[in-house]
Amino acid sequence: KETEIEKENGGKGEGEKRETQINNGQMGLFDAESPVDESVVNGQLPDVHPAEGGRILQNISTVPHQYFLTNTEEKINALIELLSQQKSFCFDTETTGLDTQKAELVGISFSITPQEAYFVPVPESQEETKLIVQKFKNIFENETIEKTGQNIKYDISILKKYDVEVKGKFFDTMLAHYLIQPDMRHGMDLLSETYLNYKPVSIISLIGPNGK
């Protein structure tokens, strides 16, 4: 598993599985009331991808989206109920580092539809974190629900530390890309730009270098 900032270089993509701390910048990204960027209204153009001969990429400012900060018991219970009704969902763990034996959970993100995601932050206390993670235990261990992730074995290893055994069918976007394009890099940012024509928000722009 690459470093959390290395998700920009491998595993989850350039700057995605991050060595991170939750701060106001990141919370703004997942705020349910976060509006579409005003620059869209003002006519801001999407980014240009120089490596692709000037190909225009979409970004968070040009694509309508909804990110929900799920940080209360009521919101968590509602999310669990929503996930329990799905045939599949995508998830990602945010942690303090790369080593699964040492890394601590910072939060978990979920998505079931395009341009919509939920982020569940957890406290510094690992005992309190375990209580929150345990609420999702039945969802993760439900074998009838398929789980999608990028380098998902890392996320599975992290959740196992909190007594959650992720079960069911898995779809790993990193492994899938390796099978069809073994000679390319497999970072999530690159996959997004290549196949979705979308440039993800850089984690560095949210929390700074090395999560500071």
Image (cartoon, rainbow, N blue to C red):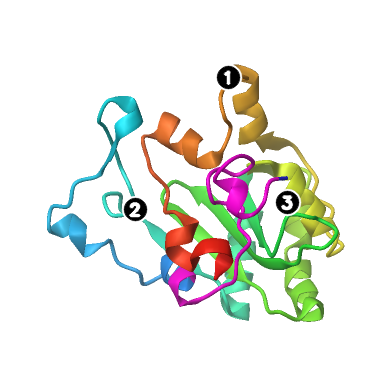
| Residue position marked by numbered label 2 in the rendering | 60
Magenta segment includes 20: yes
Magenta residues, start to end: 2-26
Give the quarter of the image for residue 98.
bottom right
| Residue position marked by numbered label 3 in the rendering | 155
Q: What residue is rendered at 66% in x and 74% in y?
A: 122
Residue placed most toward the observer, 82 or 23? 23
- 54 versus 122 height, above or below: above
x, y percent for residue 143: 78, 44
Q: Main secondary structure of the magenta part?
A: loop
Q: Earlier in the sequence, mark 1 or mark 3?
A: 3
x, y percent for residue 110: 58, 56
Give the quarter of the image for residue 177.
top right
| Residue position marked by numbered label 1 in the rendering | 181
Magenta segment includes 61: no
Mark in front: 2 vs 1: 1
- 162 versus 166 height, above or below: below
Q: Secondary structure at mark 3?
A: helix
Task: Check disc 2 and give the amino acid type.
Answer: Ile
Residue 68, visible in the rendered structure: no
Q: Secondary structure at mark 1?
A: loop
Query: Position of 54 compared to 59: left or right?
Result: left
Task: Check disc 1 and give the amino acid type.
Answer: Gln
Mark in front: 1 vs 3: 1
Give the quarter of the image for residue 188.
top right
- 108 versus 50 height, above or below: below
Query: Position of 204 compared to 133: left or right?
Result: left
